[in-house]
Image (tube, rainbow, N blue to C red):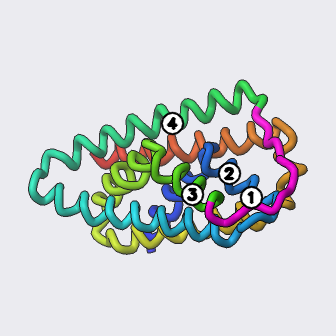
Amino acid sequence: MQAIGAGFGLGLSLIMAIGAQNAFVLRQGIRRSHVLAVCLTCALSDAILIAAGVAGFGRLTQAAPWIEPVMRWGGAAFLVVYGARSFLSAWRGGAVLVAEGQGGEALGPVLLTCLALTWLNPHVYLDTVVLLGAVAAQYEDRLGFALGAMTASVVFFFTLGYGARRLAPLFARPQAWRVLDFAVGLLMWTIAASLIRGG
């Protein structure tokens, strides 16, 4: 259960970071446009990347044991920087969600946009393949860690997509984004500290 919880927590914290993909899911949810397809696409893409990261990194560290500590310290450094950026964003404020007008979009272009925002984003590989793979190596139950991270992805995207209409008035206010950014930064730094202590 510890590995599942850790995977869920780290997976959720990485996904929660405000970015183009999340803004797209929010926008589709607010417009009620192909929400199920968009959420499934994001969650399944994450599951593939998480599985590749956890499985591939495990085999790689067996072949080259020096990679694990390098990746662990690199992951901790990344989380420190990522958290600092979230804190800076919370300090500056000013981010708001601008909802577009509703429209009857075709499914094809919506899914292509969703896939592009997911697979063409270099950070997704760093987050899911490298970082989650590195942290998973700290646990004997890597499968549990991966399942926790995958579950976080499913929970987050479906909550975001289907809860978007309720959240729209909230995230029209910059203060809401500041609170979210601060929470993400705090979680990132907490996980970085746990990686450093493991060294």
Q: Is residue 154 visible?
A: yes
Q: CA distance from mark 1 to mark 2?
A: 6 Å
Q: Is residue 73 magenta?
A: no
Q: Mark 2: which amino acid?
A: Phe
User: Looking at the picture, how far across and down is residue 31, in whole percent?
Assistant: 82, 59
User: Looking at the picture, how far across and down is residue 68, in whole percent?
Assistant: 22, 49
Residue drawn at point x = 35 percent, y = 73 percent: 143
Q: Which mark is residue 153?
A: none
Image position of 183 (left or right of 112): right
Residue range (magenta): 95-108
**Quadrant of res 178:** top right
Q: Quick one: label 3, few (<14), some, or many (20+) residues within 10 Å?
A: few
Q: Is residue 97 magenta?
A: yes
Q: Are marks 1 and 2 in contact (CB under 8 Å)?
A: yes
Q: Earlier in the sequence, mark 1 or mark 4?
A: 1
Residue tagged 2: 24
Residue drawn at point x = 45 percent, y = 40 percent: 79
Q: Mark 4: which amino acid?
A: Tyr
